[in-house]
Image (cartoon, grey):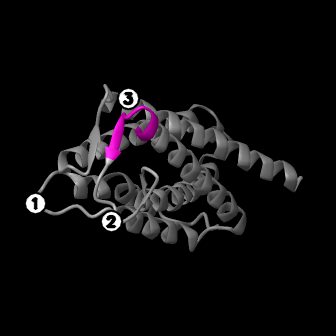
Amino acid sequence: MSNSRSIYHFVFEFVIFFFGLGVFMVPSGMPFNWWIIPLVSLLLFLLEQRISTRGNLEIALIMGSFLLTFDFAFENVGTLLFGYWGTRGSSLFVLAVPIEVMLTCFLGGAAWSLYVMSMHTLFVSRFQGRFNGPLRLYLILLDLFFFGVGGAVAEWSLVQRGVMYYANGWISVYAFIAYFATWLMLHILLDALIRRRQNSAR
């Protein structure tokens, strides 16, 4: 992977990932289409994949598969067992989960992993040994809060559009906690996979 990438490249992808979908999903006269989410995820994945190393790509595909599996189980439990939420308007449901959400989890999870690993490489090269201290922790916390808030706001927007609903006491605060906890798990898993690769290379 090249470390010569401009920081503006990262900012561009950051804006697309966190705010592009949010702008689309804000209640408006534009009809909602579930396929916009996996298409944006695919775009971000392709942007990262073309400059990724093979080792990073392998890790990213594991991460995408994990997020797909975890989200599939979590959503089905929340919908079918507890009735906390539900969705409408998908072109295909796999049990209670829209196929578009499943594709988004895989592609988006892989794209996020490539982004984080690339960002980590960039910061290590620029800050040398100082990056493994508080700076790295602050960036991880920032990432967790962005996904927590972004996920909760995105679901709120879907509820306003009538393609998703909450029930039985589930509210946006719980959605924030769920997204925050999910991305905390992803960071832990990603760190473990990177450490395992580093140890095997010695």
Please name the amino acid that badge 3 sits on.
Tyr
Front residue of this view, candidates 125 and 138: 138
Front residue of this view, candidates 40 and 165: 165
22 is higher (above) or lower (below) than 38: above
Please name the amino acid that badge 2 sits on.
Ile
Left or right of 7: which side holds 157? left
Counting from the top left corner in percent of width and height, residue 133 is at: 63, 33
Q: Is residue 140 visible?
A: no
Label 1 to label 2: alpha-carbon separation = 16 Å
Q: Find residue 29 and name its label.
A: 1
Left or right of 143: which side holds 53? right
* Secondary structure at numbered mark 3: helix
Please name the amino acid that badge 1 sits on.
Gly
Residue extending farthest top: 169
Q: Residue at x 25, y 51 (%)?
A: 163
Which residue position is annotated with label 3? 174
| Magenta span | 79-86
Counting from the top left corner in percent of width and height, residue 24 is at: 24, 58
63 is higher (above) or lower (below) than 58: above
Q: Is residue 51 visible?
A: yes
- In magenta segment, residue 66: no
Front residue of this view, candidates 164 and 20: 164
Give the mark, 1 or 2, whose residue is nearer the N terminus: 1
Label 3 to label 1: alpha-carbon separation = 28 Å
Which quadrant holds the N terminus? bottom right
Identify the image quadrant of residue 10: bottom left
- In magenta segment, residue 83: yes
* Secondary structure at numbered mark 2: helix
